[in-house]
Amino acid sequence: MKTAFFQPDIPTQPNDHKILGNVLPGADALAISEITEQNQNLTVVVTPDTRSAVRLSRVLSELSSQNVCLFPDWETLPYDTFSPHQEIISSRLSALFHLQNAKKGIFLLPISTLMQRLCPPQYLQHNVLLIKKGDRLVIDKIRLQLEAAGYRAVEQVLEHGEYAVRGALLDLFPMGSAMPFRLDFFDDEIDSIRTFDVDTQRTLDEINSINLLPAHEFPTDDKGIEFFRTQFRETFSEIRRDPEHIYQQISKGTLISGIEYWQPLFFAEMATLFDYLPEQTLFVDMENNQTQGERFYQDAKQRYEQRKVDPMRPLLSPEKLWLNVDEVNRRLKSYPRITFKAEKARSSVRQKNLPVAALPEVTIQSLQKEPLGQLRQFIEHFKGNVLFSVETEGRRETLLDLLSALKLKPKQIQSLEQAKNEKFGLLVSSLEQGFIIEQSFPVAIIGEANLLGERVQQRSRDKRKTINPDTLVRNLAELKIGQPVVHLDHGVGRYGGLVTLDTGGIKAEYLLLNYANESKLYVPVTSLHLISRYVGGSDESAPLHKLGNEAWAKSRQKSSGENS
């Protein structure tokens, strides 16, 4: 049984709406985790936007013992002329399929996705194909079933919704699956089913069965196309004969890009997420969901007015595709609900406050004489335990090196609960923003964003495809004079300190990097994301590259080739 930091009051009856105030940034994930541990039913968490849903999904996967499922947005703007990525459709179909039998766990989605009308539950129930080892099936028959479900025939399977036939082998990447499968036939019997690697095409593990979900959120077989045609004629008075007209293209079986915005024409009646949920579902939502939902719906209406003039693509009105916020609020009354607010609430039977407090300023001030001065002062005066949270194992080593200046050596722990037993702890987790848990013996959680600042950290995220996040320099305090560092474009040099230069009458701060032949490179502080620590060996054995030399570029190309 997990040790609880909070004792949240869990509503259990329909229309029982409670307010939890003082939910500070970072504390929301811990509060949700503890709510779901006490709740005996499914918990649906509705966030203002996709970014916050993704963040909570990542943190809750570490904090909670419950299954965490993120129901993604299409990641297209209303009435866009391109379709969502197949991986997104795969995740959505898988989430909806498993939601129908979910009794407990955490289901996350942004408010705009909750407003979206969905395929009916019966569509998924009636269009799932179970394939087992030993089944007697003709490959040509499976091919027809796959095409009816919307799967595409390709030469080599690379992404969700594709299949390929090569002799007695059938490769298949089902929607909702993390891996593709290879079916090996012996005559008309499935002799084996194995997963395989998309990049190498090598088979991996053998399994006994797979669930085959449809490739789209709407039917694409002949019956589905004919139903679309009937609905289209009833909805729009004019049917043009131009070959590029949407009606003509769908009639030929061509699924145009952006077809998802005509999804209601494939069904007699659309559903919403509420139609998938068990009766005792608990909702957790955020105070600004209402504003964000209204903004989204208004944007959808504006885009509808701007784009409905295209005679080749007559549009369905917004109410056909989304619920408005009033309708969402009306349906929420059928469920128990907790709303998070950042401000403190007036305590009552219906309103409670989370027992947390904001951290004081502890950001490392790299330009000051004592960069860790604010952190030192906080630790000296704080009467409780302190837990440092870092994103990766590599970042942990960097932080330990920084904290050594304060003669601090926090103990590495494996879970948040262990912070209660350690004066100074260090946890690898996705908790970026810290806070203080106020209890009989308080615990202060300090995240990397608190120590290193938001700006450098956010910029580094954008560069993770080119630099290992473990080696990124996120704060100047991480560097020592003479330390070998790697510039993304110029290779290995030595850090020479921070200098101020006047260029064109504008003073700015630069990192001085020394290279071979006494060459110097001045890197603006704003380009700190281009600098990483050297990890190829000891500092003494690190090379010193020449500026303008092709050796570094060749080394990078060779490394990229080996890793691709």
Image (tube, grey):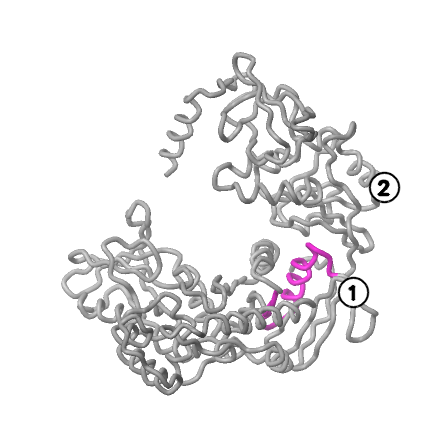
Q: Quadrant of residue 281?
A: bottom right
Mark 2, other Cα within 10 Å: few <14 / some 14–19 / many ≥20? few
List x then y, in percent, for residue 21: 76, 65
Nearer to the camera, 266 or 243: 243
The C terminus lies in which quarter of the figure?
A: top left
Q: CA distance from mark 1 to mark 2?
A: 25 Å
List x then y, in percent, for residue 503: 65, 27
Span of residues in magenta = 23-47
Which amino acid does the dot numbered 2 rest on? His
| Mark 1, secondary structure of its residue | strand
Nearer to the camera, 62 or 208: 62
- Where 187 sits versus 541, above or below? below
Q: Quadrant of residue 12?
A: bottom right
Mark number for residue 290?
A: none
List x then y, in percent, for residue 186: 16, 60
Which amino acid does the dot numbered 1 rest on? Asn
| Residue 42 colored in magenta in the image | yes
Can you identify the residue that label 2 sits on?
381
Residue shown at 73% from the left, 57% from the top = 24
- Where 275 sits versus 67, above or below? below
Can you identify the residue that label 1 sits on?
353
> Which mark sits nearer the N-terminus, 1 or 2?
1
